[in-house]
Image: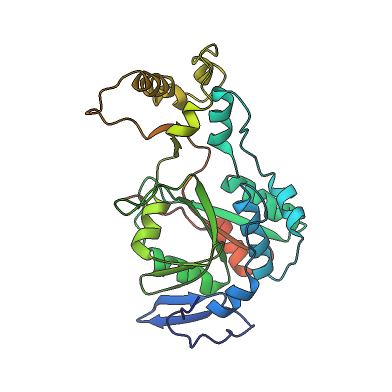
Amino acid sequence: MEVNPPGTDGEAAANSGPDAVQEAGEVHAAMLWSVQQAVERQTLQIGVSACGATAVVDVLQALGITVAPETADRCVRTRLRRNASPLPDYLHSRSEAGATHHQLIDGAEQASGARVLGRFFSFYPPRRVKLVSWLAHWIWCGAVPVATMNMQRGMAEGEEIPDAWHHQLVFGVGPNTVFMTNPLDVVSEEKAHVRLCSESVLLIRREDVLKRFEPNSPISLISDQCADPRWKTLDVEGQVRRMMNEEGNSNEDHPKMTHITVPAAYRSGITLFALRDSSVGQELLSVSELPML
């Protein structure tokens, strides 16, 4: 990846801590790793739905703690999709597959022997925050950010909609730029912010619904087997019925549903990790939530 972060020459950053660029008292860029270091150090996806555990491996690495990927995955307790299940159970599994920020925080603490703590900052409903400056401040202080994003938001017209949410370690920021791992990626501040500010919902592709629908399986099980009232609020059963009715309707002038919307267990935002006995770790325990717009 031939991209150098602002304020660096692409060479390895100093091992003593993050690099930062400040102007008029505000941090505008900060890097935990240079791009070259990220290429060499990043952990690629360690398993199915395991982007959260993968991020935890890199969080601990950035904080000077080495753990095996399987240890991180076990501590995070990654949930899997139940692809062979009938539609109601499949949809329930999709709503929670992977990990929430709570699981990342608990997993990092357990895998590190309680040496690491995490604090989640919600970005939805919308918050009054300058994303890059806020991230740069915390990176410069020694925290390690992980973004929990709805990748189904912020798509360009005609672009295929991704199939899931995603956790990515943020290894640096520059003016209007966010640098992330797994995969190594550079996105604009605006695009990152859109993905970080999302309702907790997930789009399920039409084909994934149709191939699991069984006529003899009551659609009511979608809501009846789940205590979360959002399944009824979103009328997931009604969405499935409409999609099935479309299969018997040959009216080509009426566009067919491409997805249904189900509740998601995840919340969009940033989790900041730090060593528990560090000053930034103690600050994270007491700092206020981001103010709402």
Query: Is residue 218 shown above or below 170?
Result: above
Q: Quadrant of residue 32?
A: bottom right
Query: Is residue 284 shown above or below 218?
Result: below
Residue 138 at x, y = what percent? 51, 68
Q: Residue at x 45, y 27 (%)?
A: 230
Q: Residue at x 51, y 14 (%)?
A: 215
Query: Is residue 59 shown above or below 173?
Result: above
Residue 238 at x, y = what percent? 39, 19
Q: Is residue 247 left or right of residue 120?
A: left
The reply to whether residue 275 is visible in this rendering is: no
253, 264: nearer the viewer = 253
Q: Quadrant of residue 23?
A: bottom left
155, 256: nearer the viewer = 256
The reply to whether residue 231 is visible in this rendering is: yes
Q: Residue at x 41, y 33 (%)?
A: 261
Q: Residue at x 76, y 62 (%)?
A: 67
Residue 11 at x, y = what percent? 55, 87
Q: Is residue 8 left or right of residue 157?
A: right
109, 156: nearer the viewer = 156
Q: Quadrant of residue 192?
A: bottom left
Residue 257 at x, y = what percent? 34, 31
**From this viewpoint, which residue is outermost toward the left?**
253
> What colouring style does the render use?
rainbow
Query: Is residue 140 shown above or below 52?
Result: below
Q: Is residue 111 left or right of residue 234?
A: right
